[in-house]
Amino acid sequence: MLTKEDNEMLTRVGPGTPCGELLRRYWHPVCIASELTEDRPKKRLRVLGEDLVIFRDEQGGYGLLAEQCSHRGASLYYGFLEDGGLRCPYHGWLYDATGTCLEQPFEPSQSMLKHSIRHPAYPVQQLAGLLFAFMGPKPASLLPRWDVVAWEDGERTLSRQQILSCNWLQAEENTADVTHTYFLHGHTMRMKGRTDGEYYYRPIEQYGFQRFEYGLVKSWRYADNGSRFGAERGGGNPLVFPNMLRLTSGPTHSIHWRVPIDDVQTRIFVATFSRSGEGRRWGAERPEGEQPSIDERMDVNRDPNGEYSLDTFPSQDTMAWETQGPIFDRTKEHLGASDRGVAMFRQMLKEQIEIVQRGAEPMGVIRDPEKNQLIELPGWVVEGTPDVVSVHGGTSPRVKSMDTVFDERHEIMEVPFGKARPRPSS
Ligand code: FES
Ligand SMILES: [Fe+2]
């Protein structure tokens, strides 16, 4: 349970709020690069409660500016991309991608007004077909080269899920919640007569949590229930601080970013990567600069009656997160031992908010280019042998063993026999 004040502190994302200031220390994906085309080179965005316009200029560079003109507030979205910047449609003030006002066509030539204008502008970088923005104080940190966006020896897809009508923290707390998969995914799929939740429908014997350099890593021990997956002692699928999930599922690696639109809406971007397994570059024959394919299937969450379809993992998760309310009132919750990961994540958030308030650098902010060549995250770690790996079709070079990630900080809880851990039948 949180106090009302703490709930406010951990959820609000606007400029000047404690969590908003923390989130502004990290790069966030805001747009899929291929959405900006020659025909439609501008797009309106709302990110962390700020209304923005992202654009690709005549030279192919990207800019991200506050939507409302610094003159008298008209929307720059309707402006003209010309003369090295974005020109306001109302009276023609011209801004470059750094927010410098280059022209004010009706002001006297000796006017100093334009030199006093600092239009809000944020750096944008492209990586793996996504456009990332940094909305914090300069100098910006390095855009992290997480494995899923830095690897090149395979196929990448990108997707943007339907807008989530709830606060970002509900989605991100789920990443610290290792036991939800049994009922929300495994049991739901089984009740629908489907087999695609089987991995998560094995009896859970143990679950655990541990901090690591970039966030929080989870563990599990599944019993063999005669399914094709067998027993497994594994871990991974970490929460990458502050708002990511790094997931490995069979041979597919992915990152989900839960980017706050504002306090009550969230946009989820997903990048997936399937490795060729031999260092071979699957996409090598594709023309230079081609965008990864965009998968929109994750947009289907509702059935014809407007209810959650619960047919897909995203629909199941969306149901759980949105029905908690626009901003879940955590003064009314009752946390148990299985919510230990959620509690650890909140602790981490509070700690890092305080670090930012002291003027220091929070965890996971990268400034050393050496360190940023390739940041491999523990997507999937298993106890055991390559056999375990081949059963799930994973790419063996990227599956680490448990002791490379977990140590004496690992907190493990035992699940009693019952609904989520049926007793072995014989
Ligand atoms: S409102 Fe933009 S130039 Fe006047
Ligand atoms: Fe889930």
Image: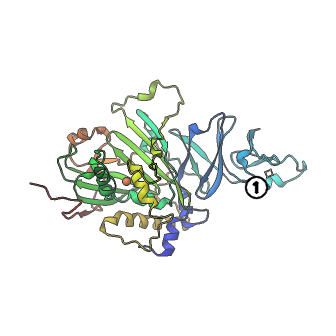
Q: Residues within 10 Å of mark 1 (few under 14, many from 20)?
A: few
Q: Quadrant of residue 146?
A: top left
| Ligand 2 quadrant in view | bottom left
- Whole-percent x and y of residue 280? 38, 28
Q: Quadrant of residue 214?
A: bottom left
Compared to residue 38, the image places residue 413 above or below, namely below
Compared to residue 333, the image places residue 65 above or below, namely above
Residue found at x 45% / y 41% = 297
Quarter of the figure that contains the N terminus: bottom left
Mark 1 sits on what residue? Answer: 73
Quarter of the figure that contains the C terminus: bottom left
Out of 299 and 343, give the one closest to the viewer. Answer: 299
- Whole-percent x and y of residue 108? 91, 50
- Amino acid found under the numbered disc labelled 1: Gly
Out of 347 and 317, give the one closest to the viewer. Answer: 317
- Whole-percent x and y of residue 89? 78, 46
Q: Is residue 327 left or right of residue 206?
A: right
- Whole-percent x and y of residue 127? 52, 40
Out of 144 and 93, give the one closest to the viewer. Answer: 93
On whether ligand 1 comes within 8 Å of the CB at mark 1, the answer is: yes
Q: Is residue 372 left or right of residue 226?
A: right
